[in-house]
Amino acid sequence: MQTNNKKIVSINKLNDASSYEMQIESLKKQKNLLQEVIDKVPNLISVRDASGKFILVNKAIANVYGYEANDLIGRNDEELTHQPWKIESCIEIDTMVMQQKQERIILEETIKDSNGKKIWLQTTKQPFIDKSNDELYVLGVSTNITQHRIAKEKLIQSEKRFKDFAETAANIFWELDKDFNYTYISGSIKNLIGDSSIYPLGKGFNTLFSNSSKCEFDFDVYKEALEKRENISNFTFNVKNENKEVDIFRINAKSIFNKNKKFEGYRGVIRSITEEKALLERIAYDAKHDALTGLVNRNEFDKQLKRVLKSAKATEEVSILCYLDLDHFKVVNDAAGHSAGDQLLIRLCHILEDKVRASDIVARLGGDEFGIILERCPLNNAVTVCENILRSINQFVFDWDKQSFKVGASIGIAIITDKSENEALIMSQADMACYRAKELGRNQMHIAHTNDTAIIERSSEFTYVSAITEALNNDRLFLMKQPIVSVSRDDKEIPHYEVLSRIIDDKDNIISPNEFIRVAERYGMITRVDRFVIKKAFHYHMQAHHNDGVVISINLSGNSVSDPYILDFIKQELETSKLEPSSVCFEITETAAISSITKAINVIKELKDIGVKFALDDFGSGLSSFGYLKDLPVDYLKIDGTFVKNMVESEKDRAIVRSINEVAKVMGMQTIAEFVENDEILEILKEIGVDYAQGYGIGRPERLN
């Protein structure tokens, strides 16, 4: 029995030992499971005892220290190389938590991990007692809020940045709540209303303006707009600034609704538009006015003329258009410079404005040309106005830099009635009437009438202006050539020819130079015609003769002689065409040469230096032919055809031709007789000793191929 009892005790002991080992194993498994669980949690989890030693940690907190989790157990911060928390801080917090026992605290703190990276944590400290040994511990659970904190910092910076911009911006940003009370306003209140004592936050929308006598603000209209809870666009109000000037402000606002479409208030901007409005007004003014004189410009004048004509057709009331062109204005520009000319125009504008009614329209149409519309004005009254203007301008003396100048004016008058066709015709009539006034002696007026022959004649000139423009733009100007032959030789060799220009109009009619050259000169188109002819003639001559010694003569107008760019143009065309300069002869009329003697001499000398020849055309038609001849180094004298064609019947004409030829020979020039129409004239020219002849008796003009 005793033996059996011992066996039973021994078996029980074995069972107890086995049960204990199983319990130990179970606890190990639970501990391992707990460790695996907390290691998978991203939060930093730790348990410390009263001395600050770690009892439990997870991988997340171990990584911060740079250790394995097992290496931290039983150690405190003082024993570790890397101390992410400040030791004193941890001890103080843990001590406080332990003293409060069941109290829990939550705090934000920063640490640095083993790589020196700053981490923001939200940490919860919770005390608890291990009932098995009555020990007090602290559970710490920290959440990494670094990304959240960075985002928050960025948001704070962004808000600060916006606030800085708002506070320093010229605009004023504001916000109202659902009751229309201010929750935010930027900038200086004083800059807006001149009163810094008003503090609007928490107060109603009218706080800024209701007590200020400097504001002109329509509260009723603004309140009505707010109560609609719709966006507000371009609500304007005025404020008198410290200089008693009016500043203009504009309000724009957006109504705010939450995701449930419940109204929450307004956000908006108050912006000063004083300078913007002034700029827009200035742009609008400049678009209608001349920059120099401040008068209405041509574009606005045309609009007003169109309006007045429309009114005349509706009311049958008469209005008057006056076209004024200054006489001798160019003298002031040439003698005293353009600054003087500008000042003269400004002063003359004051005269014009002083002599008309405030309702009348005075415009600068360009250069020294002005237009005046006398609306609802009888003709006799208009004549009186124009007489007063002419008298005042004639009496005006312009003093500049110790010089005194007087100018005149010519005025053309056109009557605007319900029978007037259009504004373009009215302008044309006034322009032509002004030109007629100049022809009649200047410093006077002329009234355009439908039966005025001078006006009708001038009207036909505009047809030629259009034809010339069309010809140049669409290559409808063509060249012809007429031979120039030696008088003394009987062979048929043509060593020289002159190119002549013709225009084909839009109806395929040929316009001769006698018809369009005068118009081209009058309307400043002749230089363009000359350039067109030079370019085309150079090209033809090179293609036809290849520098074989034949000379081509090309007419050069007085305007082209005065053109500062003509020398460069001719030289460039010679180079482009590869034409020998010695095969080119330019013909300048005597009148053109004498009227611009200095410029003519310069052009002739510079082109002769490279081999170009020159002829003085229509010689003998001028009043001082021989007096100027010695100053013009030309190669040929072309004897005016009016003396040549009547040589057979007129002894006087023969004498003139003979004297011109003799003078030319003394000066080393050759002579060319124009208008040689028959053999009798040719025989007389041989007898006199003229070198060359040109005319229908020699050869008629023929078109260049």
Image (spheres, grey):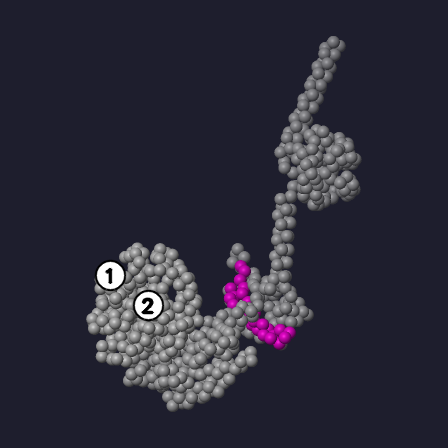
Q: Is residue 450 above or below residue 10?
A: below
Residue 670: give its label. 2
Q: Secondary structure at mark 1?
A: loop
Q: How far apart are the two marked residues, 1 and 2, measured between alpha carbons?
A: 18 Å
Mark 2 Cα-neighbour bin, 10 Å: few <14, some 14–19, many ≥20: some
Q: Tell me what residue is drawn at x 36 percent, y 68 percent.
A: 668
Residue 250, by quadrant, is bottom right
Q: Which residue in the structure is indicated by mark 1?
A: 493
Check residue 253 for magenta coloring.
Answer: yes
- Whether residues under marks 1 and 2 lie with C-beta atoms below 8 angstroms apart, the answer is no
The numbered mark at residue 579 is none
> What segment carries the magenta color?
231-257
Q: Residue at x 50, y 76 (%)?
A: 335
Residue 22 x, y percent position in the rendering = 67, 22
Does residue 74 appear left or right of residue 155 in this picture? right
Q: Nearer the viewer, residue 313 or 177?
A: 313
Instruction: Identify the image quadrant of the N terminus.
Output: top right
The quarter of the image holding the C terminus is: bottom left
Q: Taking the image as drawn, is residue 309 in sight?
A: no
Query: Where residue 341 appears, x then y in whole percent?
Result: 49, 76
Instruction: Out of 669 and 461, give the one closest to the viewer.
Output: 669
- For badge 1, the amino acid type reads Glu
Question: Residue sitting at 34 percent across and 84 percent down?
Answer: 448
Magenta region, main secondary structure? strand
Residue 513 included in the magenta stretch of the image:
no
Is 91 on the left-hand or right-hand side of 354? right
Lower sequence index among marks 1 and 2: 1
Whether residue 127 is situated above or below residue 480 in the rendered picture: above
Q: Tell me where residue 2 appears, x and y as whole percent.
A: 75, 10
The three-letter code of the residue at mark 2 reads Gln
**For residue 321, above or below residue 611:** below
Q: Quadrant of residue 628?
A: bottom left
